[in-house]
Image: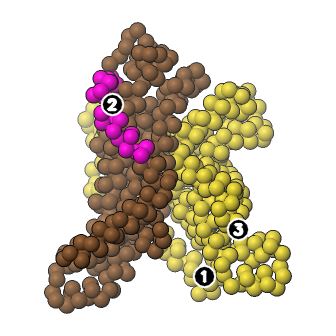
Chain colours: A brown, B yellow
Amino acid sequence: MENKKLQKSSYLRDVLKRFFHHKLAVLGLTVLALEILCVIFLPRILHLDPYSLDVMAFGAAPSAKHLLGTDDVGRDLFARLVYGGRISLTVGICSALIGLAVGVPLGLIAGYFRGPAEILIMRLADIFMSFPSMILILVLASVLGQSVVTITVVIGVLGWPEFARLIYASTLSVREKDYVESAKAVGTRNGTILARYILPNSFAPIIVAFTFRTAQAIITESSLSFLGLGVQPPVASWGNILYYAQSIAVLSFKPWLWLPAGIILILTVLSINFLGDGIRDALDTRMSI
Amino acid sequence: MRKHIQKRLLIAIPTFLGITLLVYLLASLAPGSPLEMMFMDSNATAEAMEQMEARLGLDQPFYIQYLRWLSQLFQGNLGISYRTGHAVWADISERIGPTLLITFSSLILSLLIAIPLGIMSAYKPYSGWDYISSGLSFIGAATPNFFAGLVLIYVLSVRLKLLPSSGMYDSSGVRTFGMLVQHMILPVIVLSIQQVGSFIRQMRASMLEVLQDDYIRTARSKGCVERTVLLRHALRNALAPVVTCVGNMIPFLVGGAVVTEQLFAWPGLGSLMVLSINSRDYPMIMGITVCIAAAVLIGNIVIDILYGLLDPRIRYS
């Protein structure tokens, strides 16, 4: 028991050591942590209000009162950026979680039980992967309505094939291992084998895929909102703040309305991608320190 | 090779049918029946509506309606647009060209950038070129294409007034090739930014792998110039995975085209899609989706054939 604990903690230490060795990943993690702290606590500290209309300032330039100016109906842009961050980050993370929750069981079933389930699930995954998901998301969002929840669910569910493929591949290799066979021989139930032996083996690629999927989902949500088909105002998201830049007047003369949201968007996605890279290297036991 | 293509075709057909079923299902979930859409502003009697319903087969069970729609589809009849009243196919066929024009151009542009950069960074890993190209691919992957587009429009169109920012031609009515090229530049760059990163990474990775093979050492030891080793011996084998990568990129390219066309008011399928979604023009939405599905599948088959041409192991198996 003692021994096992020791080993576990040293594995964790190795992983952490490798992770902190990856400077860009640490930078990414720091930026993300700061962003998350900001979107949670800034509204309370600074009493931000993304909805109230300042009738004295329609489309005002940045000033002491409105740090990043106001949009054309007089809403404070800094407040909208912070609240938009809440929505964009939440949509990104939740939809990646949904994709994982749908994809992982399907991949497990396909890889472990094989047979017709395998053909059906993996063929479906092929179909979904080869069809532009943006088109399906547009159709679904137009049919089901454009609330934050439906958008999260739609982007999330359409992310399933990536997770299913990953789990499927690792399940295929693990299910032939001796320890799985011995577990079967002593009569372990399938559910237990899947949860105890097969799933933990896919942990690393799943975590990495999860981070990249989050970045992807944030971009998808912002593109959708930019088209005016995603998160609907007055609710703010980074994408729908950028929607106003489609007007050439805003684009030309009020860069403070669209530039900050875009820069933060890129910064966030870059950070998540660096973080994902770092986690991948850290969890890869073949990598030397 | 023929067997290989036959197999691909056999997979493509159920895929296409699956997508048509999915699209039909989705459209039938949409609020507002086709009848309500057609009789939107006329005060039609219930009797007239019933007659229309029977005429259109809307009183039939779901699968009959689907099969009917499908057989119409194969006869080239995609229905009538709610928005314009034109045949859906007529509107779509007008817009396929512009979309293919910018997507293909961007594919070629990004390969032209990515292949040399990928070769160089694989040839000298951790060199200046390597850092430049990996930096490029990271930023390219992290920049939503609409934001890249906004920045380019702001800098090149608004500030420097170098390039036009919308449409295919200007409003003068004169249509010259030069004008078309000018209008194409920005959308094509925007679409390329999104792809170039993954092409560079793929090219670098597969080139690195190939360069370690024995036959490269043989080529070098018999005295080939480095240039010949890289371009004659290594490149061809290293290209095969890049071709696969191009195939995987097609769906993202189409998705990117929707946003890019909308931003640049480019008269293609993508901006028609946004227009149709905003006006809940379901026959048009379904028509576009089915056309895109067909295009993507054809694209995949072409990629498979190309792959077979590059890799004799597939051709002869």
Question: Label 1 is placed on what type of residue?
Answer: Ile
Quarter of the figure with the C terminus of chain B: bottom right
Mark nearer the N terminus (3 vs 1): 3
* Labels 2 and 3 within one chain: no
Q: Residue, x 40% and y 9% (percent of image)? A: A56
Q: Which residues are magenta?
A: A30-51
Mark 3 and mark 1 on one chain: yes
Q: Nearer the viewer, residue B94 or B216?
A: B216
Q: Position of residue B24 (x, y in %)?
A: 37, 54
Q: Residue furthest top?
A: A56
What amino acid is at disc 2? Leu
Q: Quadrant of the N terminus of chain B?
A: bottom right
Residue, disc 2: A42
Residue identified by numbered label 1: B314
Residue A6 drawn above or below residue A51: below
Task: Say which mark, if any, is on residue B123.
Answer: 3
Spatial separation of the CA atoms under disc 2 and disc 3: 48 Å
Question: Mark 3–mark 1 contact, CB under 8 Å?
Answer: no
- The main secondary structure of the magenta stretch is helix
Label 3: chain letter: B
Subunit bearing disc 1: B
Q: Is residue A63 above or below residue B316?
A: above
The Cα atoms of the two marked residues, 2 and 1, are separated by: 58 Å
Q: Which mark is residue A75?
A: none
Q: Residue at x 35, y 32 (%)?
A: A83
- Single out the mark in the foreground, 3 or 1: 3
Q: Amino acid at mark 3?
A: Tyr
Q: Residues within 10 Å of mark 3 (few under 14, many from 20)?
A: some
